Amino acid sequence: MKLSPLFFSVAVLVAPALRAATTITRGPYLQTATPTSMVVRWRTDLTEPSVVSYGLSAAELTSTAKASGVASEHIVQLSALKPATRYFYTVGAEPRKPAARPAGEDAPVPLGVSSFTTPPQPGTSLPTRVWVLGDAGTKTDTQRAVRDAYYKFTGTRPTDLWLLLGDNAYPDGTDYDYQKAIFEIYPETLRTAPVWPAVGNHDAKSANSITQSGVYFDLFTLPRRGQAGGAASGTEAYYAFDYANSHFICLDSHDSDRSAEGAMMQWLKADLASTRREWIIAFFHHPTYTKGTHDSDKDADSEGRMNDMRAIFLPVLEAGGVDLVLTGHSHVYERSFLLDGHYGKSPSFNAATNVKQKGDGRAGGGGVYLKPLSRTPHAGQVSVVTGSAGHAGGSTVPLGHPAMVYAFNEPGSAVVDIDGLRLELVFLNDKGEKRDWFSMVKE
């Protein structure tokens, strides 16, 4: 039978439209990890439902979590999880292909199932590995070399969590900067270990801590309600969380009120008073002591931020029993003695009163640093500046702060391992060499 042209016209009009397949352009990445929950985020080029399928086996993703509506910026919380348990997951409503690989760029996130392990119950003594990156986001071969050196070092040992110490995406902390400097450089770590960032001065070029607006605050989901442990801060600019027997405190050294009467200080005091963890680790961007690409003795440097963190916040941290202070900003590596009470400029440093234990903190050297088992005010802390994960200051940087045991003008990152009452830190340079290490033990 011969069909009229009218038939074909009608057929074309009523044929259902085929929807283009969506592509993951960012992530997935993990946020706000607690023993019973995990936030999974990712971005797609088109809007679609936000769905995560997960389970205890890669072959049996029998549980599903969803967010309402459709979006291209996906944020899904997985709840009612088991502590210290490995989960496998996929994201997206339907299978899809990865984004096309741009010439000269790292490969996009591969297809397949990812996994993460939930934190243990707070207070549990469980070996913990923390990767620490300061001033990482330069988008350079140096940044990639530092990354690869850590990957070779850790091998099959999973990263439990990682810290970004600020200036995470150069030069301006834009969405594009973060895409190239973080999401395309660390895809594997992003989808397997929760990342906990601090804001730096370069991030703040595209964000505002006071209004909690801008790129940094759009990209990260952080525990402002205290849902990951510690006191509720009410802001994502500074916050706290627990992992095993450790308590981590992130401060905003750039944008938030740094006065002794300000909201951040009042929150810090409440948080220190509330925690019962055996280790306390504080991290923020601007160092309390440095003679690297920045000088903590100069009031004008960084608009007094380093002075404020040393003179106003460090006394409270030390009174609260802090064990380790991690900072960036200065593009070098510097590591102090076990210290207490040095709140002035470097000429006021007095080894006789400010050094709690002499030596380099090594078993084969001057002996590991020893602290009381019970949390004791002013028992000593080690300050580490590790701001060279993206680039180093170079040979013309003088170094030489008297509080420091070791200092290097080399690219690298730090690795913190905590096992029960023992904490160890290693500085790995971009060639994979262990340039510094020390141990701290609670007796």
Image (cartoon, rainbow, N blue to C red):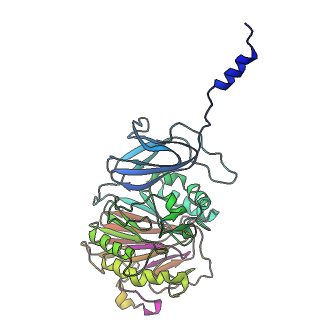
- In the image, residue 143 above or below residue 301: above
Is 272 part of what is drawn in magenta?
no
User: In this orientation, which residue lies closer to the viewer: 431 or 263?
Assistant: 263
Identify which residue, 376 or 62, lies in the foreground: 62
Q: Nearer the viewer, residue 133 or 423?
A: 133
Give the x, y percent position of residue 338: 37, 80
Going by the image, does 365 lie left or right of 293?
Answer: left
Extreme residue in the top direction: 1
- Give the residue drawn at x 27%, y 72%: 273
Give the side of residue 154 with respect to residue 104, left or right. Answer: left
Q: Is residue 114 above or below residue 331?
A: above
Q: Quadrant of residue 7?
A: top right
Q: Which residues are magenta?
A: 324-349
Which residue occupies 48% across, 79% down?
406
Query: Quick one: which residue is furthest to the front in this view?
Result: 6
Can you give x and y, in whole percent of width and height, for residue 418 in the image?
36, 64
In the rendering, at what x and y percent does residue 4 appear? Answer: 74, 14
Residue 220, x across and y down, in percent: 48, 59
In the current view of this chain or complex, which residue is farthest to the left?
374
